[in-house]
């Protein structure tokens, strides 16, 4: 008996420390390759796992939407348990749901939220080493918030796009960019209708320069208008970045 073709939406959580990123690559182990391998054991053949977006090596996800099509011989709840039994401890399927045949994890996404964590202390933190950027210099929260406010809205974010990107359209809309601090832990959370390559990490790197006093926050509008990557700050390291949520 051949089971009907289903389009299943998986919500995946992962610690990206040990992986070369979401996408399968010639060298290194990716989250995508392990999920596709697990799906292949169930279906008897490899089936592509399509995520809402790629995450770089070392980047994490609380809720990465992934859709996969196949003739699954089990219901959603059983599929969820089966996949989790075959995945390593740092990758977890949080939910599995059969969705409409035309659902597409990338094309149907309306808003995405990323969070970046900064451990701002003269002392290191063992528990935050894999999930936050350790910045020793004191950071001026007010200056960072002032710089962040200029980024909200529809802009050409070319100045914050990583090198060797194939994306041609560089206009995106940021609907919120919030910076909060609780003791030594600082978070930068940004929601937009899409992101360029390394855009969040480049934004954070620039805001940290403003927090350190190396860049005036009033320069943010000028940096955006320049459409020149060299005008913005450095790229923040990957381990502090989390994909938090995707809205459809």
Image (spheres, rainbow, N blue to C red):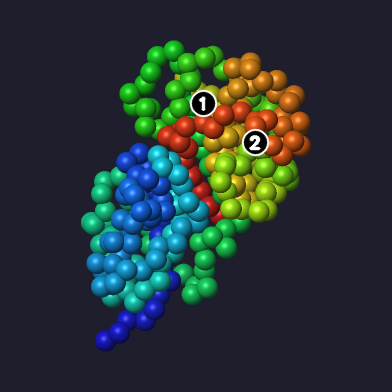
Which mark is drawn over residue 229? 2
**Rendered residue at 57%/63% (across/down):** 107
Depth check: give the residue in front, 30 or 130.
30
Q: Residue at x 51, y 38 (%)?
A: 115
Q: Where is residue 97 in the image (x, y as percent from the top left)?
A: 41, 65
Work out which quarter of the rendered image holds the N terminus and state it: bottom left
Query: What is the crowding at mark 1: few (fewer than 14 residues within 10 Å), some, or many (at least 20)?
Result: some
Mark 2 Cα-neighbour bin, 10 Å: few <14, some 14–19, many ≥20: some
Q: How many numbered discs? A: 2
Horizontal side of 128 relative to 156 (left or right) equals left
Residue of label 1: 186
Classify residue 130 by image quadrant. Answer: top left
- Of 20 and 85, nearer the camera is 20
Residue 155 location (% of width, % of height): 73, 44
Q: In which quarter of the image is residue 157?
A: top right
Determine if residue 210 is in view.
yes
N-terminal of the pair, mark 2 or mark 1, is 1
Q: Nearer the viewer, residue 188 or 231?
A: 231
What residue lies at 58% left-to-right and 24% top-to-bottom? 208
The image shows residue 161, relative to residue 185, as above or below, that is: below
Element under disc 1: strand
| Helix, strand or loop status at disc 2 | helix
Q: Is residue 132 above or below residue 168?
A: above
Q: Foreground: 79 or 125?
A: 125
The quarter of the rendered structure image containing the C terminus is bottom right
Residue 142 can be seen in this image:
no
Checking the image for residue 142, the label placed there is: none
């Amino acid at each position: 008996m051949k089971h009907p073709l289903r389009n299943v939406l998986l919500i995946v959580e992962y610690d990206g420390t040990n992986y070369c990123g979401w996408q399968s690559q010639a060298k290194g182990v990716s989250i995508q390759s392990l999920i596709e391998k697990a799906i292949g054991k169930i279906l008897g053949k490899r089936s592509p796992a399509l995520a809402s977006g790629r995450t770089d090596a070392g980047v994490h996800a609380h809720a990465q939407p992934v859709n996969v099509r196949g003739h699954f011989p089990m219901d959603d709840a059983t599929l969820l348990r089966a996949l989790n039994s075959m995945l390593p401890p740092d990758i977890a399927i949080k939910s599995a749901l059969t969705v409409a045949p035309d659902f597409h994890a990338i094309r149907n996404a309306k808003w995405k939220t990323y969070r970046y964590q900064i451990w701002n202390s003269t002392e290191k933190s063992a528990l935050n080493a894999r999930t936050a950027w350790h910045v020793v210099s004191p950071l001026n929260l007010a200056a960072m918030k002032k710089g962040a406010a200029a980024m909200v809205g529809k802009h050409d974010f070319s100045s914050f796009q990583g090198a060797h990107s194939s994306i041609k359209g560089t206009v995106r809309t940021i609907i919120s960019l919030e910076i909060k601090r609780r003791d030594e832990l600082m978070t930068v959370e940004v929601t937009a209708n899409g992101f360029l390559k390394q855009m969040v990490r480049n934004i954070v790197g620039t805001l940290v320069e403003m927090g350190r006093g190396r860049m005036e926050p009033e320069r943010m509008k000028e940096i955006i208008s320049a459409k020149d990557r060299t005008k913005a700050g450095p790229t923040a390291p990957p381990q502090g970045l989390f994909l938090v949520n995707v809205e459809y």
